Image (cartoon, helix red, strand yellow):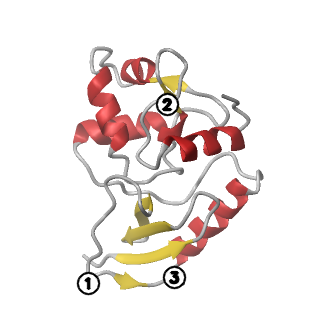
Amino acid sequence: MTTFSTHFDSPVGTLLALAKNDAITTLHMLGAKHEPVQNEAWIDSSKLAVFLQLRQQLSEYFDGKRKSFSVPLAPEGTDFQKAVWLALTKVPFGETRTYGQQAEMIGNPKAVRAVGAANGRNPIGIVIPCHRVIGSSGKLTGYAGGLDKKEFLLRLEGIAF
């Protein structure tokens, strides 16, 4: 299956997007943890329709005009990870949840640490909003892109720390 790639400039740095079958599989901040390794088989295609849609939606999000995303997504991971990431998409713009609350959302309240690990492996940052998950103390914890970027995204959504 062909993987397409492109890069976007954003207020949180350069983003790498990957797509297969007209759906986004990866949106990653370059320089962050778990950065995908460049693959020579990727086809650079900034004009791919799903990338144009993603670029438009990200631009609207960073301009404060968009609160949710409708670009097609196809994150790759285990069934557990996919359940965790699906739960993330249900956390509304401008709100946060704790890892414990997220574990409850997937029907596994004892899986708090596993939920945190799955969030850390979220392949489609920003669009699948793992930045909206905070520690039970109310403090910012863990974010593959860096806590400064997590705080930036939360402030963009009207959440002050």
Residue at x 77% of width, y 53% of height: 65
Residue nearest the viewer, comparing 30 with 60: 30
Count of numbered circles on the image? 3
Q: Is residue 47 above or below residue 31?
A: below
- How far across and down, in percent of the image, does residue 6 sit? 46, 77
CA distance separating discs 3 and 2: 31 Å
Classify mark 2: residues with Cα within 10 Å, few (<14), some (14-19) or many (20+).
many
Q: Is residue 143 above or below residue 31?
A: above
- How far across and down, in percent of the image, does residue 100 sit? 40, 18
Residue nearest the viewer, comparing 95 with 37: 37
Q: Relative to residue 77, is residue 35 drawn left or right? A: right
Lower sequence index among marks 3 and 1: 1
* Circle 3: element type: loop
| Quarter of the image where the N terminus is located | bottom left
**Contact flag, marks 2 and 1 (Cβ < 8 Å):** no
Q: Which residue is mark 2?
A: 133
* Circle 2: element type: strand
Q: Is residue 72 above or below residue 158?
A: below
Which amino acid type is shown beneath numbered disc 1? Glu
Residue nearest the viewer, comparing 88 with 15: 15
Q: Which residue is mark 3?
A: 46
Q: Relative to residue 129, is residue 142 drawn left or right? A: left
Q: Which residue is mark 1?
A: 40
Q: Relative to residue 14, is residue 113 drawn left or right? A: left
CA distance separating discs 2 and 1: 34 Å
* Circle 1: element type: loop
Which amino acid type is shown beneath numbered disc 2? Val
